[in-house]
Image: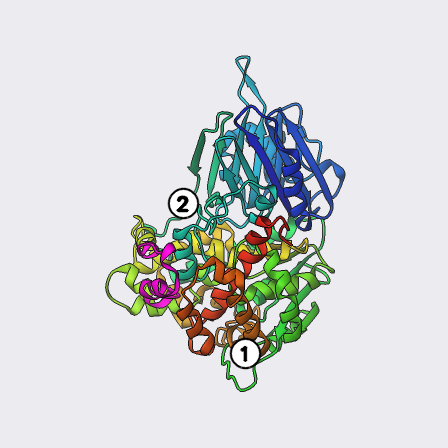
């Protein structure tokens, strides 16, 4: 719902307010409704507000509680804020606003750092604690991020100061960031289709606070991080029956959906792709919302390419849902000419380089949706949580070490190909295989697929799709909420036996509870993989665009890629796809383009777009 930034000095100097203002300005599109700053000694906050709950000025930020000696900047939504507020009122707290931001302040005062365990929602926030104890000032900074990293929090720190922001480019705008490439992060980026697990980013000088983590920072620069939530992927001692699992799924999903819908003082729409997940959201909402707004997007197909389940649009199915539930439906068909024209904007808006086709789709759809509503619900997360992707059963059928079963069907390229692609200056050992092996080997998982789904839900999903679900819509002041990542629903699904989730081609619990709610034609259709065809089947002007990027002087000077590998991909781009069917050429071009827009422009003094 907002953009946040700040600086804490350790060296006795005052905060660099010009840097904080530059960071805040870079976040302006995330929060067009209000801007504000707060300064206290070595600390400065900046905030850009997208007003969704309590639209009055009393909920503007930075929010300062002079009685409790606390100040807050917050991005996100606490879905259970009303219940927490009632509990805090019972404890004697009084409120000056009606929103969820002040609830965070009071909750922190009441329960300390453990307050995050009580929050249902998506959040990244910073609290400046100015309380006094025993007449000794103990000001400190407290930062926190939600369980699935739905809301971002980027950090850069040196001996003199810590800065944080809702986007990486905002930190770059502040200046003084080490922009050298991180070789380990590059290996992750090119192996896990642009996923760089926290705390790393592709830049050495920028880190991310991991999901489900808090961070306390003292005035002398000491940092203490704590993980406040982990995902249990073991079977219950008394396993429920199939009917009991399905009943629990329906109840928990409906409860999550109600939380997501009600925590808003503005209308809430739905991104309706035409797939099972978003269609189920509409079906469950329809009786509770008058004049429900739904939104779909489609793209041009590629002549002569049979896309099978990868349809350029899914209007056939979204129309079916819209007609059944009488939603006020908005369909947007995007021509390739607009995709090509608007790609530079999307790259300029990317907080990190993201190759997924959904990125440009979310960017263009969000522009249109933001003209109608400020908040939408979306179905992202359901495939990872309920086992919907085609590679899960393929992995399960394999034998051998867990990391080999995983990598054969997921890694974009093996280590040998990576060394062929990247210039020797950035060569590292096979760090991604090592990292994935460690993640899969963590205790308290009953089966191999439990290990995979835990890794997906707690690590991979944070960067794909969760990051783009925040990043692209928030570039248009649009908040996207993801009910399938309600932590109670994820905890329930994580304990289900894998065979239940994989039944009938995957996502069986969701399919089962959808019967009688949405048409069988939507439930039983083959799973769609929604591409932007021109970014997968690279031809014509899109090929020339990528050729221009990869043969540019900037790319050659950077020397990141080995030219023989680049030439091989340019010679026949449609012969080189990743294991989950992404274009390897687009992958290379996208990172180089992002570096030119965000890093090279800052180095030259131009600043990112």
Lower position in the chain sequence, tag 1 or tag 2: 2
Q: Is mark 2 on a helix, strand or loop?
A: loop
Q: In which quarter of the image is residue 103?
A: top right
Magenta stretch: give its range.
408-433
Q: What element carries label 1?
A: loop
Q: Can residue 308 be seen in this view?
A: yes
Q: Can residue 282 be seen in this view?
A: no
Residue 374 drawn at (x, y percent): 69, 54
Viewer-proximal residue among 99 and 124: 124
Residue 599 drawn at (x, y percent): 55, 52
Residue 96 drawn at (x, y percent): 71, 31
The residue at which mark 2 appears reads as: 230
Viewer-proximal residue among 522 and 76: 76
Residues marked 1 and 2 touching at CB (< 8 Å): no
For the point 66% across and 23% down, which residue is it?
Answer: 67
Q: For the view shown, which residue lies furthest in the left direction?
A: 400
Q: Which of marks 1 and 2 is in front?
A: 1
For the point 49% across and 81% down, which residue is it?
Answer: 308
For the point 62% across and 48% down, which residue is it?
Answer: 605
Q: Quadrant of residue 98?
A: top right
The residue at which mark 1 appears reads as: 539
- Picture layout, residue 264 above or below residue 217: below
Tell me which colouring the rendered structure shows: rainbow
Residue 457 drawn at (x, y percent): 43, 54
């Amino acid at each position: 719902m907002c953009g946040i930034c700040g600086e804490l000095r350790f060296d006795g100097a005052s905060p660099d307010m010009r840097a904080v203002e530059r960071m805040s300005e870079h976040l302006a599109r995330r929060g067009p409704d209000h801007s504000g700053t707060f300064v206290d000694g070595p600390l400065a906050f900046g905030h850009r507000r997208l007003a969704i709950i309590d639209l009055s000025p009393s909920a503007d930020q930075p929010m300062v509680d002079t009685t409790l000696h606390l100040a807050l900047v917050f991005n996100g939504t606490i879905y259970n804020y009303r219940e927490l507020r009632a509990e805090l009122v019972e404890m004697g707290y009084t409120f000056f606003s009606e929103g969820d931001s002040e609830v965070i302040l009071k909750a922190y005062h009441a329960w300390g750092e453990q307050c995050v365990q009580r929050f249902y929602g998506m959040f990244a926030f910073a609290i400046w604690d100015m309380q006094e104890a025993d007449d000794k000032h103990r000001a400190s900074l407290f930062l926190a991020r939600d369980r699935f990293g739905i809301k971002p929090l980027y950090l850069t720190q040196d001996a003199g100061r810590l800065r944080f922001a809702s986007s990486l480019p905002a930190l770059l705008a502040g200046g003084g960031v080490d922009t050298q490439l991180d070789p380990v992060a590059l290996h992750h980026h090119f192996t896990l289709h642009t996923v760089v697990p926290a705390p790393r980013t592709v830049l050495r000088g920028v880190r991310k606070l991991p999901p489900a983590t808090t961070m306390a920072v003292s005035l002398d620069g000491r940092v203490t991080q704590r993980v406040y939530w982990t995902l249990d992927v073991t079977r219950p001692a008394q396993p429920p029956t199939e009917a009991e699992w399905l009943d629990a799924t329906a109840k928990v999903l409906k409860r999550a959906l109600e939380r997501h819908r009600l925590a808003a003082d503005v209308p809430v729409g739905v991104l309706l792709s035409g797939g099972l997940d978003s269609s189920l959201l509409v079906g469950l909402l329809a009786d509770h919302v008058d004049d429900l707004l739904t939104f779909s997007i489609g793209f041009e197909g590629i002549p002569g390419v049979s896309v099978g389940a990868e349809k350029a649009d899914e209007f056939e199915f979204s129309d079916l849902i819209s007609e059944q539930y009488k939603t006020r439906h908005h369909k947007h068909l995007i021509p390739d000419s607009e995709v090509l024209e608007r790609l530079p904007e999307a790259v300029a808006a990317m907080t990190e380089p993201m190759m997924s086709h959904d990125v440009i789709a979310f960017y263009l759809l969000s522009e249109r949706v933001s003209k109608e509503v400020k908040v939408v619900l979306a179905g992202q997360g359901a495939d990872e949580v309920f086992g919907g992707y085609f590679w899960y059963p393929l992995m399960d059928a394999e034998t051998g070490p867990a990391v080999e079963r995983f990598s054969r069907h997921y890694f974009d390229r093996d280590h040998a190909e990576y060394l062929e692609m990247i210039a020797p200056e950035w060569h590292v050992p096979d760090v991604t295989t090592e990292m994935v092996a460690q993640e899969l080997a963590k205790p308290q998982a009953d089966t191999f697929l439990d290990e995979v789904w835990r890794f997906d839900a707690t690590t991979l999903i944070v960067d794909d799709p969760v990051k783009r679900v925040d990043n692209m819509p928030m570039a248009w002041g649009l908040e996207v909420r993801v009910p399938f990542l309600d932590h109670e629903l994820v905890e329930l699904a994580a304990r289900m036996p894998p065979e239940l989730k994989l039944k009938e081609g995957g996502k069986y619990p969701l399919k089962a509870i959808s019967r009688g709610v949405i048409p069988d034609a939507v439930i039983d259709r083959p799973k769609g993989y929604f591409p932007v065809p021109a970014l997968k089947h690279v031809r014509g002007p899109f090929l020339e665009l990528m050729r221009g990027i990869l043969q540019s002087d900037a790319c050659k000077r950077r020397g990141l890629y080995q030219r023989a590998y680049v030439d091989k991909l340019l010679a026949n781009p449609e012969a080189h796809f990743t294991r989950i069917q992404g274009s390897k050429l687009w992958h290379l071009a996208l990172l180089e383009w992002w570096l030119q827009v965000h890093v090279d422009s800052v180095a030259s003094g131009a600043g990112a777009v």
